[in-house]
Image: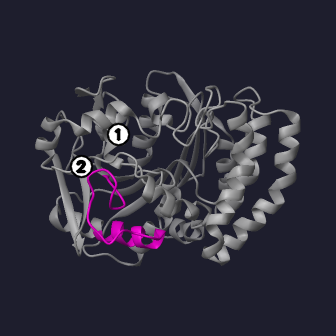
Amino acid sequence: MAKGGSVIPTSSKFMGDMLYFFWFFESRNDPATDPIFLWVDGGPGGSGTASGVGYNGPCMVNKEGTAASINPNSWTNKANGIWLDQPTGVGYSKGGPPEKAVGETVMNIYRFLGQFFSRFPKYKGPFYLVGISFAGVLLPQIAHALKQGSEPPINLKGIIFQNAMINAEAQWPLYPEMAFKSETAAPAITKQQYDQMKQGMPGCLQKIQNCNREPNVCRAAREQCEELSLTALVDNGVDFYKLTTKCAHPDRHGCNNEGDPPNVDSFMQLPEVKTFLGVSEQFIIDNDEVYNQLIPFILVTSDFFLPGLLQSGVRVLTVVGDLDYICNFMGLKTWMLDLDWPGKDAFRSAKDVEFKDSTGRVVGLRRSSSNHEYEFVQVYGAGHLAARDNPRGVMEAINDFMNGS
């Protein structure tokens, strides 16, 4: 299933009866020296291994969910990749006790990485944390824990955010602008709905600030802020994962069931797949209990670790499809421009330039710091799952960044 490399499907046990399931694929290029990345899915409660066979790994499941074929745009073209099911109760990860807070998941992923590199010490290339959506809350915390020390030492070189929520206080105010003034899609709301959203935004931002001081208010804060930012789009039948898509009843899975693709779910439940993976449990592609438990923490900011990480040599890339609303390019670009770190002024004065893939096709816009340690890539015409909508462009942006070009 992985041309030119080995496949290691297994679990990592580190605390009580808790087992994290992961699927590892070697690079198709040079596994011994190529970078290695960990893919962390969003949700919260979304399966990472589902993404690995759904759009960014070496295998692509067919529409019927009955078979898989080689993905020419796999992120493993020039890197080793680990796709992780986290937290417990997601995908094939199992056991307990269940994680009830983001900090528990962060530390469990940290422990998992220690076990992985202890078991597979030959993969010593530059290590990158990569994640989508809710993973934006997790990755800076995981990176900070790794830089504080790990056994064995892990060669952390970068963090890659793909359509992620990283700083709700910075990103949330751009929802009305994205819905009405983005210029990448037709307005998704009316002028009256825009004005109502703008009017309610100060109250929402105050609730986000309160959440970051008092975690017990995060659930109510998230519900009220989400109602403010999503109700108009739902009423208008607009998919907030891709603003050019419409349907009668959009929900958190999107109009096309993007958050819970039935073909991938069916494939992972096939008896022959379970036998190959050495598992017997039911595959849970999207765990609603995990979602309900952890989603309030979407408002928690963890980017305060990033300035120190950047100064220590950890690079940061944000890749974002410009038709996504939920983790939109306007909010993410504003956040990147405003992050306080020594290279802030130089990054703000840098120019957006066309980013082309290896065929010469324009993928979107790229802005880079002088040493390419801090980059933003806007992907034209792509939604929340930018790597599915523009597989070659996103793959090359990420492989180039991991390989230092």
- What residue is shown at x 41% (from left), y 78% (from top)? 148
How many residues crowd around disc 1 within 10 Å: few (fewer than 14), some, or many (20 or more)?
A: many
Vertically, is 195 above or below 129?
Answer: above
Most frequent secondary structure within the magenta stretch: loop
The quadrant holding residue 93 is bottom left
The quadrant holding residue 146 is bottom left
Kind of residue indicated by mark 1:
Trp
Residue indicated by mark 1: 75
Instruction: Indicate yes or no whether the magenta region holds residue 103.
Output: yes
Residue indicated by mark 2: 23
- What residue is shown at x 34% (from left), y 52% (from top)? 37
The x and y percentages for residue 296 are 58, 63
Instruction: Indicate yes or no whether the magenta region holds residue 362.
Output: no
Question: Is 343 displayed left or right of 102 in the figure?
Answer: right
Tag 1 secondary structure: helix
Q: Is residue 15 visible?
A: yes
The quadrant holding residue 344 is bottom right
| Closer mark to the observer between disc 1 and disc 2 | 2
Vertically, is 102 above or below 71?
Answer: below
The x and y percentages for residue 171 are 69, 53
How many residues crowd around disc 2 within 10 Å: few (fewer than 14), some, or many (20 or more)?
A: some
Between the C-alphas of marks 1 and 2, the distance is 14 Å
- What residue is shown at x 32% (from left), y 54% (from top)? 85
Q: Which residues are magenta?
A: 84-111
Q: Who comes first in sequence, dot 1 or dot 2?
A: 2
Vertically, is 281 above or below 271?
Answer: below
